[in-house]
Amino acid sequence: MNASPAAIGNRGEKIESAHSSWVPPTALTSRQRFIRACRVLPVDRPPLWIMRQAGRALPEYRQLKQKYTFLQLAQTPELAAEVTLQPIRRFGFDAAIIFSDILVVPEAMGMGYSFRETGGVRMDFTIRSEAEVERLCVEQVLERLQYVVEAIRLVKGDLRDRTSLLGFVGSPWTLANFMLDGGSSKEHTRAIALFHANRPLFEKLCEKLTKAIITFLRMQICAGADAVQIFDTLGGLLPAELFQAASGKWIERIRHAIGKSTPVMVFSKGTRDWSGLVATGADVIGIDHGISLAEAAAQLPDNLAVQGNLDPELLLGAPERTAAATKTLLAQMDGRNGWIFNLGHGLPPTANLECISAIIDTLRH
């Protein structure tokens, strides 16, 4: 079913054989299950976590939101830890992901953000010149993001070695789009325009973001994150021939700086440049729901883990429909080590929690 690694290039490393280091399924903790899947080693069942599982759809999160703003929740370590742990208590996922936001990196560099009443994000200013890029301070990241570090330590102390804890960042390309457009936009256009019109300035911005991201990821790993995910949410805006130059090469640089001891996952929504994604050196490639999981996995090496990709819309209806779609994915991935079950994008705020339970029941029985 899968293409050989040679079909799209050698990743330049050898991952431990998927047929070695067998551990009896009854001996696996959730954390072991998740890490083994990242390393393409046999597991008793696919590990499960869901993007945006912390918050949004959970009633216990909504109760907190009546008292605190999103930024208060994210920037107060005790509250961020509580939100991170809520879905683990309710569903027993194999991995928790720290409650935060991709825009904490620009904020730590001196470019704050807020939420519009009409929805979406507004950056405190919009980058229009080289002087504004020069204003961004990478050196502030270590001090200004200590609240995330403290939240990770609190969560790690609760999870111990039972459940994996994930850190995350936005990719340089995705963050650059928000910073150049001044926040959320129906059509992000200024980053690609800058890429074509003033490549040196585009690269100066991405260079700064890359350094800040490396610092932040190292902070999260040192605090206890078992794996990290790079959200290249706007990667699909790029045509395949530009992906490597505008996004992929920066992710590759980040991955190289992190080292191989910590699994790195890359979720580049809408990207179909499989060779470019492999070239990033990621241990796990997240697949969005715009393509068949089997089709995507067939274009990736067998020694590369994949993550995904149930359509989030399937969590809005009947649990039976969700269970049937989950069974379909199980059949598609049968016999392939290195699969982490997830959605093809984030959990909808109006998701039916019984649908999440249906996924869990299907995977575990």
Image (cartoon, rainbow, N blue to C red):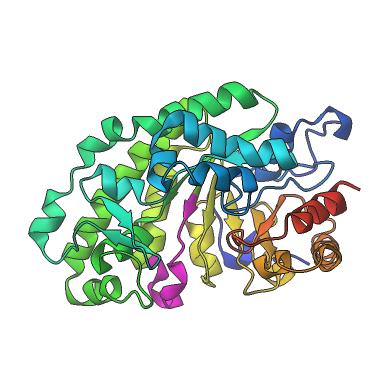
Residue found at the very far front of the displayed protein: 66
The residue depicted at 67 percent of the width and 61 percent of the height is 351
**Image coordinates for residue 155, horizontal then vertical, percent:** 55, 28
243 part of magenta stretch: yes
Quadrant location, the N terminus:
bottom right
**Image coordinates for residue 270, horizontal then vertical, percent:** 52, 71
Above or below 157: residue 87: below
252 part of magenta stretch: no
Q: Which residues are magenta?
A: 230-244
Residue 133 lies left or right of residue 44; in this view the side is: left
The residue depicted at 70 percent of the width and 35 percent of the height is 89
Picture quadrant where residue 352 is located: bottom right
Residue found at the very far left of the displayed protein: 131
Residue found at the very far right of the displayed protein: 365
**Image coordinates for residue 343, horizontal then vertical, percent:** 66, 60
Asked if one can make out residue 77 in the rendered structure from this viewpoint, the answer is yes
Residue 217 lies left or right of residue 46; in this view the side is: left
Q: What is the count of numbered marks? A: 0
In depth, the one of 72 and 248 nearer the eye is 72
In depth, the one of 81 and 60 nearer the eye is 60
Residue 110 lies left or right of residue 48; in this view the side is: left
In depth, the one of 179 and 296 nearer the eye is 179
**Image coordinates for residue 34, horizontal then vertical, percent:** 69, 40
Residue 136 lies left or right of residue 14; in this view the side is: left
The residue depicted at 28 percent of the width and 70 percent of the height is 191
Picture quadrant where residue 94 is located: top right
Picture quadrant where residue 186 is located: bottom left
Asked if one can make out residue 95 in the rendered structure from this viewpoint, the answer is no
The residue depicted at 54 percent of the width and 36 percent of the height is 262
